[in-house]
Image: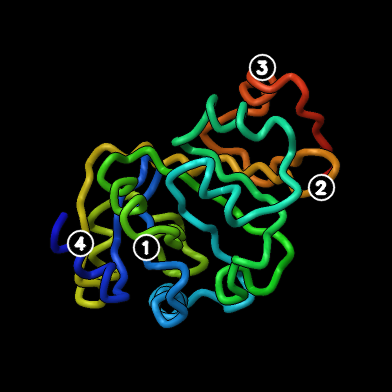
């Protein structure tokens, strides 16, 4: 952990496990670190990134116009496999969300990864894969894609391989942009006031 922390502190990138898939992490407020991750992934520059944060207070610090039930949603599902999209505020740099009006938030529950987020967050942490390929779920795949390019790689054999559910709360109604580990039914059961826009 000390070596991983040193790499992050110097603006480097890490491949770390979450409870779902491997992520490619770097400090979100360090533009050079973020650009390095885009290059490692061959990710199109207009594809926005999420902020990996450690608490509800962090989400509130980088968003605005949050729904009244946000704290209930946090208590029910976070940390965990849920990505929440909210309206971004002025603290979110354009190099993270590509100048969009929204930004996604993720709080992974993997204890060591979450501890690094607490120390150095917010972090970006897109899935550890080359853009256009499947999310990184095996150590062999990670080493094939990033071995020799990323110094800090932490193995974990207990990933579920199922992506997080992406829930967009930036509009008048909620939208599920990607069905992942948490179902619509589970969301509605926990937060009855959620109103979904089911248009494709």
Q: Secondary structure at mark 3?
A: helix
Residue 43 position in % (x across, y down): 51, 74
Instruction: Point out the frontmost of discs 4 and 3.
Output: 4
Q: Secondary structure at mark 1?
A: strand
Which is more N-terminal, label 4 or label 2? 4
Residue 20 position in % (x across, y down): 40, 42
By what rule are the colours in the image chosen? rainbow
Residue visible at 20% across and 62% down in the picture: 4
Rendered-image quadrant of the C terminus:
top right
- Label 3: how many Cα within 10 Å (few below 14, some 14–19, many 20+): few
Residue identified by numbered label 1: 25
Residue identified by numbered label 2: 171
Which is more N-terminal, label 3 or label 2? 2
Alpha-carbon distance for marks 4 and 3? 39 Å
Which is more N-terminal, label 3 or label 4? 4
Question: Which numbered circle lies on residue 189?
Answer: 3
Alpha-carbon distance for marks 2 and 1? 28 Å
Q: Secondary structure at mark 4?
A: helix
């Amino acid at each position: 952990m000390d070596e991983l922390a040193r790499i992050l502190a110097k603006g480097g990138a890490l491949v770390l496990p979450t409870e779902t898939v491997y992520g490619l992490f770097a400090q979100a407020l360090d533009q050079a670190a973020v650009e390095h991750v885009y290059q490692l992934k061959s990710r199109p520059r207009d594809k926005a990134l999420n902020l990996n944060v450690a608490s509800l207070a962090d989400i509130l610090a980088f968003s605005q116009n949050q729904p009244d039930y946000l704290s209930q949603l946090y208590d029910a599902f976070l940390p965990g496999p849920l990505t929440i999209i909210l309206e971004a505020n002025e603290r979110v740099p354009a190099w993270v969300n590509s100048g969009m009006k929204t930004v996604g938030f993720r709080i992974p529950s993997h204890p060591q990864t979450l501890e690094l987020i607490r120390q150095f967050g917010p972090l970006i942490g897109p899935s550890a894969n080359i853009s256009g390929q499947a999310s990184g779920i095996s150590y062999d795949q990670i080493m094939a894609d990033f071995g020799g390019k990323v110094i800090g790689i932490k193995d974990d054999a207990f990933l579920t391989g199922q992506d997080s559910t992406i829930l967009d709360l930036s509009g008048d109604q909620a939208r599920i942009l990607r069905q992942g580990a948490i179902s619509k039914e589970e969301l509605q059961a926990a937060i009855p006031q959620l109103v979904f826009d089911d248009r494709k």
